[in-house]
Image (tube, rainbow, N blue to C red):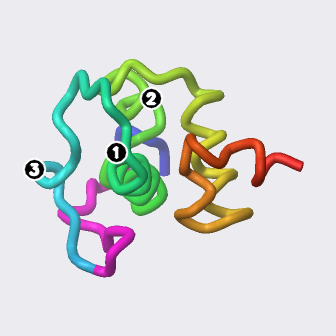
Amino acid sequence: MNEAMRPRVKYVIGPDGSPLTIADLPAPGTKRWVIRRKAEVVAAVRGGLLSLEEACSRYTLTVEEFLSWQYSIDQHGLAGLRTTRIQHYRQ
């Protein structure tokens, strides 16, 4: 089934274990990205709440930037999203 035909989910489980809806996501145009907001966007894309294209457009992200967030979560958990310790995790 292609992207346009696939039914959209109403909510996904967020990084803290609670339900996450479109209304709970960071506001479009968010400039300050803290760990929680990054993790919410990644969870929304993974769960089918947003497509990758929608997320990148909504938050003016590049695909590479989003994929780096996803990779950091996969490799190091939420702590991998910290910008202050990024060199520690990129070895």
Give the amino acid at mark 1: Leu
The secondary element bearing badge 1 is classed as: loop
Q: Position of residue 30 (x, y in %)?
A: 26, 28
Left/right of residue 3 with respect to residue 80 in the rendered view: left
Q: Which residues are magenta?
A: 5-17
Q: Residue at the location (46% across, 52% down)?
A: 42
**First reached walking from the N terminus: tag 3 or tag 1:** 3
List the residue tagged with mark 2: 53
Left/right of residue 88 with respect to residue 43 in the rendered view: right
Q: Position of residue 50 (x, y in %)?
A: 34, 45
In magenta stretch: residue 11: yes
Task: From this view, report whether residue 63 is shown above or below residue 9.
Answer: above
Q: Nearer the viewer, mark 3 or mark 2?
A: 3
The Cα atoms of the two marked residues, 3 and 1, are separated by 12 Å
The secondary element bearing badge 2 is classed as: helix
Q: Residue furthest right?
A: 91
Quick one: 87 or 17, which is closer to the camera? 87
Q: Position of residue 6 (x, y in %)?
A: 37, 51
Give the amino acid at mark 2: Glu
Q: Residues within 10 Å of mark 2 (few under 14, many from 20)?
A: few
Give the amino acid at mark 3: Ala
Q: Which mark is residue 23?
A: 3
